[in-house]
Image (cartoon, grey):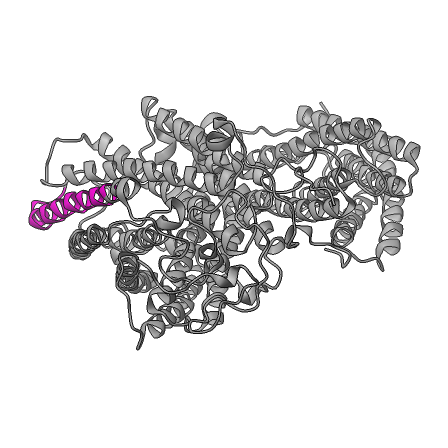
Amino acid sequence: MSTDTIDILRRAEAPIHPAPESFIKKYIFSVDHKVVGIQYFIVSGLMILLSGLFAEAIRVQLTGPHNTFLTPQQFDEAFTFHGTLMVWFGAIPLVTGAFGNFVMPLQIGARDVAFPWLNMFSFWTFPPAVLILLSSLAFGAPNAGWTEYPPVSLQAGVGIVFWTTAVFTVGIGATLTALNFLTTVIKMRAPGMTFTRMPLFVWASAVTAVLSLVATTALASALGSLFLSHVFNVPFYDPSRGGTVVLFQHMFWFYSHPAVYILIIPVFGIVSEIIPTFARKPIFGYKLIAYSTVSIALLSFMVWAHHMFTSGLGPWVTMPFMILSMLIAVPTGIKIFSWTATLFGANLRLTTAMLFVLGFLSTFTIGGITGVMLASVPVDWHEHATYFLVAHIHYVLFGGTLMGVLGGIYYWWPKVTGRLMNEKLGKWHFWLTFIFFNATFLPMHFVGLLGMPRRVAYYDPAFHGLNLFISISAFLLAGAFLLLFANAFWSLKKGQAAGPNPWGARTLEWMISSPPPHYNFKEIPEVYSTPYGYGEPLPYSAPYNQVSTTPTY
Amino acid sequence: MAVKTETLGHGHGYGHGVMTQEEYVEQRDLRFLGFLLFLFTDSIFFTAYIFAALYLRSAAPVWPPVGVERPDVNLGAVNAIILFGSGITAHYAMHRLKESRLAGYIWFTIATIILGSAFLGGQAYEYAHIHATWSGSTFGAAFFTLTGLHGFHVLVGVVYLIVTLLQSLAGKYTPERHFGLTAATLYWHFVDVIWVVLFFLFYIY
Amino acid sequence: MDIAHIADTIGALGAIVVGFFAIRFLRKEWKLKGADIGITKVMLTLLVIGCVEALLVGLRIVGQTPLSTH
């Protein structure tokens, strides 16, 4: 703010607050960003499992063209809950709430986020939102898909009211988290850590926070209008009283397109941390990666109507949106090429985390390419609302976000728990996930191109063979996740002690013990350079430059 | 130097005990930035509905639709001036506190609260007399949603001002340390400025 | 003189008074620096615009719809 600011939070001798002693303050209503991060991890992880079960129910139904496992109504509810839970209750809290909370303050050398109490509050909007959402199952569940387009969404029971309330509530938590993170990154970096010395995950978290601040509130207004339409019969979306349903699509996608980047940009950050660590090389194009993140964020606000090419917008609207959408491939390509260039000529260490990131690179690139295809108006007219679209989004969100997140879990697990995971089991997990992921979603491209529509409980018997193959692969893909749980339990019980820096990484979170003490840094470190200077001495003040960067796993 | 245990670490530091000036400045800077980000994200909420209103307007052959009337512009202007005037008194109050003139601060804050409440009363009068309903037309939908949202913000602002007034009577704020008041004043200005846009949108345009 | 003219007069006079104070504050704060002052400047500028709106309405230049009675 003003020049007379004295940065006591950045002072080396800043005093340390004693750890809370009671169980409730320590584990339930904790204000410690690490505990909040773990809380987010557990709840959003459970949501992803639940959402996965809905997905498996969909796949069971689709094993045969006219199965009676689910009624069409239940089928609609299943894909609605699958999408809703995955996007708002699983993936977004996982990448921001869990990873952002645990890792970001450690990486900037802070003792906590800017508003620790608010952080706790943000988390505690989350479990009630889950309960509200699930209670809608009892009151005429919403069944218009996770996008809840009117008029279909307004024709269902009162469940839509619960649905909007739940997503609104979780959105409040997301907005407050974003506000908190942005303040933290701007104000609480360790002395010497200029913006261009920040780890790339911090860049990603900060940009995601900006996206979240703008977009989540816009979503809240869309949800609010849906709520008012249902409860007070307000005619936003009723054409008989002058309303228009396309308005909802505009309001919804103005949020939900940036939301795609809220889901993927933190994962870009995770990938940018893991690749140099296991390539043992400085990351190629640090500034390019950082600035391309910013430009992706800016562009993401200008492309929302590419979700609406089949909604009857005129060519003067669709053409600019098509061009801008395709333009996003440029900054994304810059990232992909920078990561590939980092891998080039490196002595790769193929740990589980690294394998997942390599898996991310290949599957996300395929998802990106089909994204450019769908951004083209004529192609989109043909492929919209077919399984080709489903395949695209799962290549981006499963093959991109979830694959990167799994890499992040294997990477930071030793930091969070203090114990290593089993690498052998982890590699089995990776290969099964990678193979069955592709076996599940690659054929969806084909059935989509052949014209199989999404969100329909029955299908033409001509698609039976491929659908059966997809369903069996999907069951095996779910089974692969059991290996992750087995590995986690094994690690907690018998895992080898990790030590402060098992991977030989160079960012600040690895310079302190695993798990970190409640105050993180006994003295606030000073930072002299970017963290990615492999082969050079650590750029931190003593004692943080004493940590060994030789991998010990 | 005595070790201060109540200052940093996990949260419940500030607000308890007496902060040094440095700690106050640090906390004030954090909270100021956080508050600005809050106002920013709140403004997005209004912006989204304003664009929705413009979209509905563009979809309508005549605006306001047939059978619907705008609220009365002349009375609306008086009501708007009441709200804008409260922005000026809020500003005065802030300056009086900075100049350590507590009595002036108190009176100007009371004036702000009265003007804010008068605006809410004026809006209630308008709601009672307008020829439009929330569920009857898209004009009504946009008008009642946006002005209702704004009215809610004004109500929150009035309560916020009353709370800060009571706090300052209890001696919480000093000419050097008054972040809570700065935030309340900024929030009040924000509420004012939203009305500049809404007044244009619904009464004039 | 009907209620609309009274409202006009009050609106226009009020706009001039409020606008005068807003401009005065703006001039005072113009040279000061600091983030909160910067925000206040933006807010005050918009407030002046609001006063111009109200003044134009009061002078019956814009926004003329008949006074609804019932």
In terms of secondary structure, what is the magenta stretch mainly? helix
The picture quadrant where one finds residue A321 is: bottom left
Does the image show residue A54? Answer: yes
The span picked out in magenta is: A459-486
Residue at the spot x=80%, y=46% of the render?
C51
Is A249 displayed left or right of B127 in the figure? left
Q: In this view, does B53 lie above or below A27?
A: below
Residue A386 is situated, as x and y percent measured from the top left of the image, at 23, 51
Q: Is residue A156 magenta?
A: no
Q: In which quarter of the image is the N terminus of chain A?
A: bottom right
Residue B141 is situated, as x and y percent measured from the top left of the image, at 55, 34
Is A242 displayed left or right of A455 in the figure? right
Q: Is residue A468 magenta?
A: yes
Figure label count: 0
The picture quadrant where one finds residue B13 is: top right
Q: Nearer the viewer, residue B202 or A363?
A: A363
Residue C43 is situated, as x and y percent measured from the top left of the image, at 75, 49
Q: Which of A199 and A312 is in front in this view?
A: A199
Residue projecting furthest to the bottom = A345
Q: In this view, does A525 lie above or below A475?
A: below
